Image: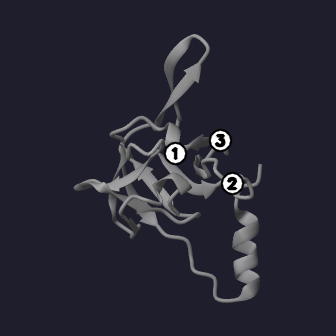
Amino acid sequence: MCDYSLMHVKSRPAAVGDRLVTTNFNTGTRGFAAAGDPSTAVCVMPGTELAFAAEVTAHNNSFLGFSHRKSEHSTAIFRQHNKHIERVHHDYLEFPDGKLMALTELVEGQHAIVLQLPAAPKTKAEAEEQRRAEVVG
């Protein structure tokens, strides 16, 4: 999925093997772009598995200024959080330790590859199970 703030940016869905880079789209958010096409947002579906070239780094805005925080992991699953709240960023990475990091907080220029897309539901029951698996906060 592409976050609401990317609705006016050219986009395409992610595919297995896509090489992505975290990009500032100058819309108030960051997201993924194809490594060779920084003007096109690559929309990732919830449940997509990603591998980063290094530990994932995010901006850590604090009272004392800007700093960075890193995940101990270089793999993550794309999730959506608080989808029921409009006009907030919903796109997150979930790491193997269960910690979440907002996609819009990622430092620009980090490289990732799409390892696996989520299985498409074949029945209503499977669709409901995938919906329940989304992060609710």
Mark sitting earlier along the chain (3/2): 2
Q: Eyeballing the image, is 96 above or below 48?
A: above
Q: Amino acid at mark 3?
A: Lys
Tell me the SS state at disc 3: loop
Q: Name the one closer to the observer, 25 or 35.
A: 25
Residue bearing mark 3: 99
Counting from the top left corner in percent of width and height, residue 16 is at 39, 69
Please state if 131 lies on the left or on the right of 122 as rendered.
Answer: right
**Residue labelled with disc 1:** 103
> Crowdedness of circle 1 by 10 Å Cα count: few (<14), some, many (20+)?
many
Quote the CA–CA distance across marks 3 and 1: 13 Å
Query: Cβ–Cβ below 8 Å for labels 3 and 2?
Result: no
User: Where 129 falls versus 50 (above or below)?
Assistant: below
Residue shown at 42%/35% (left/top)?
A: 107
Secondary structure state at the residue bearing disc 1: helix
* Left or right, 133 with reference to 32: right
Q: Which residue is mark 2?
A: 86
Question: Relative to 108, is 128 above or below?
Answer: below
Toward the top, the furthest residue is 64
Amino acid at the residue labelled 1 = Leu
Residue 127: x %, y % from top left? 70, 79
Q: Residues within 10 Å of mark 2 (few under 14, many from 20)?
A: few
Identify the residue at horizontal 61%, vertical 14% (top origin): 63
The span from disc 1 to disc 2 (Cα, nearest Å) is 17 Å
Q: Nearer the viewer, residue 43 or 127?
A: 43
**Outermost residue, left side:** 36
Q: Give the CA distance from mark 3 to mark 2.
A: 23 Å
Marks 1, 2: nearer the viewer: 2
